[in-house]
Image (spheres, helix red, strand yellow):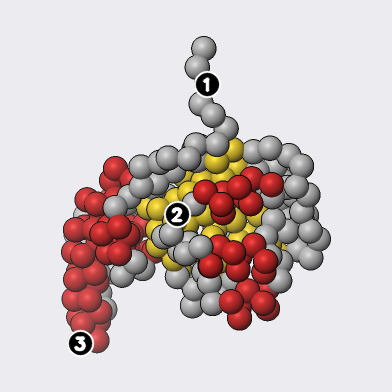
Amino acid sequence: MNQLPEVIRDIERVSADVVAKAGTFQAAILADVAGRRGTMHSRVAPVHQDMKVAGAAFTVEVRPGDNLMIHAAIALAKPGDVLVIDGKGDQTAALMGTLMLSACKKVGLAGVIVDGAIRDKLEILDLGFPVFSAGFNPAGPTKYVPGRINHPISAGGVTVSPGDLVVGDADGVVVIEREKASAMMTLADKKVVDEAARIEAIARGDTASKWLPAALRAAGVLKEGESL
């Protein structure tokens, strides 16, 4: 019986054009048009609120506290990739710090997302490289336990497949399946226009949402013919 290798080197990535377009949107816009799904748990947050990332997922699965396969992933990933690391949400030891993240920046990765702990927060802030993590811990990792590269993983409660579109900002991280990503860009454009129009209406004093009365009636809060 043929088995998938633990390390998959060649993956199909979301197109560079889609990544560039996706990078112009808030993660919240993309989450809305993608059906309000694909968002990671809020424990996975940017080291600094101004950090943004968009790219194709290069997935890594590790055992808690062991970063052996992350070193291998850095050696294999391509410029523009986003390392997305399933660290099981463990925060008892850091999986990455300044040295590894400096290497990620040097090889041209778009950013790193770790569902686990990292360290060297102040140095990372100076590095100017997008990093999202579940927390910080000064303890270093081990380098003994094999994991997997470019298999589907779970990070922040979301399934991430190699090559999927990953976008992160101050609100958190959203993942959109590679096959659906292109179609979401048109919907995101429309969402931005609609929200801009709503902001203009609010500025004119139109703060009432037209959909609210019907929604309240559907929920049984208002009776038919009754209004707020």
Q: Where is residue 196 in the image (x, y as percent from the top left)?
A: 22, 76
Q: Nearer the viewer, mark 1 or mark 2?
A: 2
Q: Mark 2 points at which residue?
A: 78
Crowd band around label 2 with a 10 angstrom C-alpha radius: few (<14), some (14–19), many (20+): some
Q: Which picture quadrant has residue 117?
A: bottom right
Q: Name the residue under label 3.
A: 204
Please indicate whether residue 167 sits to the left or right of residue 156 in the image.
Answer: left
Residue type indicated by callout 3? Arg
Please indicate whether residue 183 sits to the left or right of residue 130 in the image.
Answer: left
Residue type indicated by callout 1? Gln
> Is disc 3 in contact with disc 1, using a CB cutoff of under 8 Å?
no
| Secondary structure found at label 3 | loop
Q: Where is residue 179 in the image (x, y as percent from the top left)?
A: 29, 43
Q: Residue at x 55, y 62 (%)?
A: 104
**Label at residue 3:** 1
Does residue 4 sit above or below 52 in this rendering? above
Q: In which quarter of the image is the C terminus?
A: bottom left
> Is residue 135 visible in the rendered structure shown here?
no
Q: How far apart are marks 2 and 3 (CA)?
A: 48 Å
| Secondary structure found at label 1 | loop
Q: Which of the two residues, 41 or 114, is positioned nearer the viewer here?
A: 114
Q: Which of marks 2 and 3 is in front?
A: 2
Q: Which residue is drawn at 30% across and 57% down?
A: 16
Q: How far apart are marks 3 and 1 (CA)?
A: 62 Å
Q: Residue at x 20, y 80 (%)?
A: 201
